Image: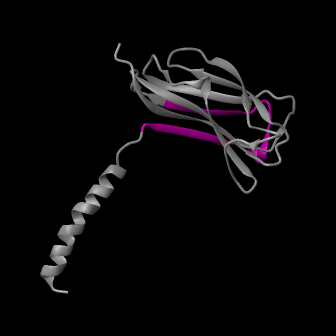
Amino acid sequence: MKKNTIYKLWSFLLPIAYCLFIPSCTQLDVFEKDTIIPKYQWQSDFTAKGSFIIKDTLASYNIYLVLRHTDAYKYNNIWLNIGLQAPGDSLNYQKIDLVLGSDVNGWEGNGMNDIWEIRKLLNGEPRRFKKAGTYSFSIGQIMRDNPLPDIMSAGLRIEKSGLTDKN
C-alpha cells in the first residue's frame, strides 16, 4: 500500500474508533458490591457489608438485592436483615422475605449450570437519598439454619433510575 492510501484509511477509521471508544469511557451511575459467603455456609453472625457514595440527591435510585445460590439450596425463599445507614445517622434495619423460586416454576433469576443469581428491587420502586455522602449497608441471614448452606454471595446494586424530582 502506498502512504497516501494508508493515510486515507486511517483518516476514515480514526473518527469511527473515536466515536466507539469515547462513549465507552463515560461513567455509569451504577454501584454493585457482592460479598462472598465463606465456604458457601452463611453463618448467622456473618454480614455482607459495603458502602457507596451518593452525590445526586435529586435523582431516584433503584436498589437491588443481589444473591447467588447453588441449585442445592433447599428453600424457595430466604429471610434477610438488611441495614442501611445514611451519613450521620444510625443503621436502620428492614426484614425481607426474598422469594427465590417456586416448586412449580423453579428458580427465579439467571442460572448457569448449578449457580443461580437473583436481583430483586427492594421496596418495589425507586427511592431518593435525602443526604449526599457515604452510605453503609449490611445484609445478614435470619433463617433457622445456622449455618445456612449453599448461599454463595450477597450484596447490593444501586443504579440511577432516570427519574428526578425537581421540587
Specify the principal SS of the magenta part.
strand
Q: Residue drawn at (44%, 18%), measured in percent from left and top?
A: 131
Please tell me which residue is depicted at 59% across the width and 25% down the height of the picture: 124
Figure quadrant of residue 149:
top right
Query: Residue shown at 51%/15% (left/top)?
Result: 88
Which quarter of the rendering shows the N terminus? Answer: bottom left
Using the image, determine if residue 127 lies above or below residue 3: above
| Residue farthest along the bottom direction in this orientation | 1
Q: Furthest residue to the left?
A: 4
Depth order, front residue of 107/82:
107
* Of the pair 11 and 91, the residue shown nearer to us: 11
Residue 2 spot, x, y in % from top left: 15, 86
In percent of width and height, residue 99 lies at: 74, 32
Answer with the quarter of the image where residue 167 lies. top left
Q: Which residue: 33% across, 50% down?
A: 23
Please say whether residue 49 is one of the residues in the magenta stretch: yes
Q: From the viewer's perspective, is residue 22 above or below residue 103?
A: below
| Residue 144 in the figure: left or right of residue 101 | right
Picture coordinates of residue 148 (x, y %)?
83, 37
Q: Read off the magenta span.
A: 29-52
Is 39 left or right of 159, judged from the image as shown? Answer: right
**Quarter residue 75 falls in:** top right
Q: Does the magenta stretch include residue 41?
A: yes
Look at the picture and state if 133 lies above or below 111.
above
